[in-house]
Amino acid sequence: PYRFELKISKDYPEAVRFLKQGVTQVSSLGDVTFAEANLAYQAVPILKPLNRDGTPFYRSAIIVRSDSPLNSIKELRGKSMAFGSPHSTSGNLIPRYMLWDKGVHIQDLKRWENLQHHDAVAKSILKGQFDAGAVKDVVAQKYKSHGLRILAWSAPIPAVPLVVRTDTPPDVVKALTVALMKLDRANPDHQKMMQTWDDEFRYGFAPATKNDYQGIFRMIKNIPLGCGIGCHK
């Protein structure tokens, strides 16, 4: 019963501002960006997209060029690395955690830089501007045929949530939830409708709650020197 207009933000902070200011009532936010929005003004997750396997998870990938001699995360000491936006889960938070988990601290890198988008990270690796980079799984797969190799995968990450403002009318939330939960990728009509959608959203949705993202909240707080909310407010 509602008509929706798509509004594209230029970056993660703008998406959060749109939601906070009421410019948008519903938003697709990354896990870290959702954590920011939840802590700042109690934004609520309602749905999370399914992947091609039918589960509500995705992964972060550390990538190198196909001809790179690097074969493990530990070998990144003394090398250069491109990360995604400081607000990105799979492009920044998770890969830094992956490095830290293997004993590689950010200061152990020869140099590093946060780029604006996942595609920019992939292209910078292909051009030889960095030895390695971090992107979400769909981008890693997209550029494999162009000459990229996946050095390491993260553990599964809760899929990026669709969130609403706390004052979004319940009828709107219900209508949106019911409509998206009805999507069935096994239904030929639904497949046809979703075939032009972004890879992250064409396989259907599952319910989401704040508890699904507790691991993200812990990670943001736990990583030494902070690489989540603590260092990019």
Image (cartoon, rainbow, N blue to C red):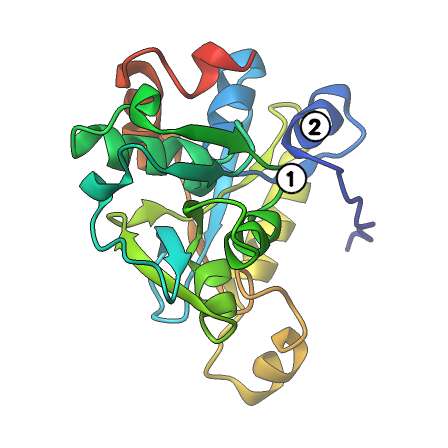
Left or right: 14, with 127 as reference point: right
In the structure shown, which secondary structural element does the residue marked by tag 2 occupy?
Answer: helix
Q: Which residue is mark 1?
A: 27
The secondary structure type at the circle numbered 1 is strand
Q: Residue at x 28, y 19 (%)?
A: 223
Q: Looking at this rendering, what residue extends furthest in the bottom direction?
A: 188
- Residue 12 picture quarter: top right
Q: Amino acid at mark 1?
A: Ser
**Dots 2 and 1: beta carbons under 8 Å?**
yes
> Where, quadrant-wise, is the C terminus in this rendering?
top right
Kindly identify which residue carries mark 2: 19
Q: Position of residue 69 (x, y in %)?
A: 28, 58
Q: CA distance from mark 2 to mark 1?
A: 7 Å
Q: Along the line of sight, which residue is nearer the eye, 22 or 89?
A: 89
User: Can you say whether 24 is above or below 226 in the image?
Assistant: below
- The location of residue 91, given as percent across then percent down, is 46, 40
Q: Is 229 positioned to the left or the right of 106 in the image?
A: right
Give coordinates of residue 19: x percent, y percent: 70, 28
